[in-house]
Amino acid sequence: MHNAQWEQEVEYLHSIIRKMNLDEAIKWGATIYTHKGRNVVACGGFNNFFSLWFYDGVFLSDPCKVLVNASEGKTKALRQWRFTGMEEIDPQKIEAYIREAIRNVDEGKTWTPERSAELVIPDALQEALDTDAALNEAFTALSLYKQKEYVEHIETAKRDATRLSRLEKIKPMILEGKGLNDKYR
C-alpha cells in the first residue's frame, strides 16, 4: 500500500523498522516485517494519513493510546498507528511498540479466528434450492464465504417482497458461480 503523497514519511517508518532485526517479505504487494515467520508490522500511506499496522496489535498494551481498529466490527487483531505529519513520528516509541510485538510472537500470542456458526439458510432461499436442482448444486459449489454473502443479502431485507425480489436477482449470479460482491473485488 503506497500513496506517493507520504513517500518520505513512509520511508522514514521503514528506516525505523529496519533497525529492529526483523525479516522483510513482500506480501500483498507491500513490504511486511516478520519474526519467526509471523507477520509483525508494516507501514504505508493512505489518502488522509500514513500508518504503521501491527498484525496482532490487539495484544499490544498501547501505553501511548495511539492504536486504532481500522475497521471496527470487522478487523479483529490488526491495529493501526496513524500519522498525519513527519513531526508525529517518535522513533523511540515506535521501537518500543515493535519490541513488544516481537515479544508477543516469542510468547506465542496470536489471534485465531473463531469458527462461525453454522449457516442458516432463510426460508425463501431454502425453498428455491429445494425446488431447483441446478440452483442447489450451484449454491453448494460456492465457497462458504459466498454462501454467507447471499444469505445475509436475503436476511437483511425487511419485507417479504424485498426478500423475494432479491432472491430473483441473485439466482442468475449463483448459477454462474459468482459471489454477490465479486464485481467489487
Image (cartoon, grey):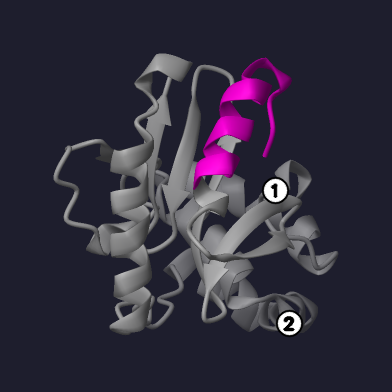
x then y, percent, for residue 168: 67, 52
Quarter of the image for the N terminus: give it: top right
Magenta part of the chain? 1-16
Q: Amino acid at mark 2?
A: Ala
x then y, percent, for residue 46: 58, 27
Mark 2 falls on what kind of element? Answer: helix
2 or 1: tag closer to the N-terminus? 2
Based on the displayed image, in which of its 4 quarters is residue 58 positioned?
bottom left
Q: Is residue 8 magenta?
A: yes
Instruction: Pick whichever, 142 or 162, lies toward us.
Output: 142
Q: Amino acid at mark 1?
A: Lys
x then y, percent, for residue 123: 44, 70
| Image: 61 above or below 8 | below
In the rendered structure, find residue 96 and report the number of the disc placed on it: none
Please state if 96 lies on the left or on the right of 142 as rendered. Answer: left
In the rendered structure, find residue 141 and report the number of the disc placed on it: 2
Query: Label 1, on which residue?
Result: 169
**What is the distance, in whole Å, between disc 2 and disc 1 at their CAs?**
19 Å
x then y, percent, for residue 16: 50, 43
At horizontal 73% and vertical 82% (from top left) the residue drawn is 141
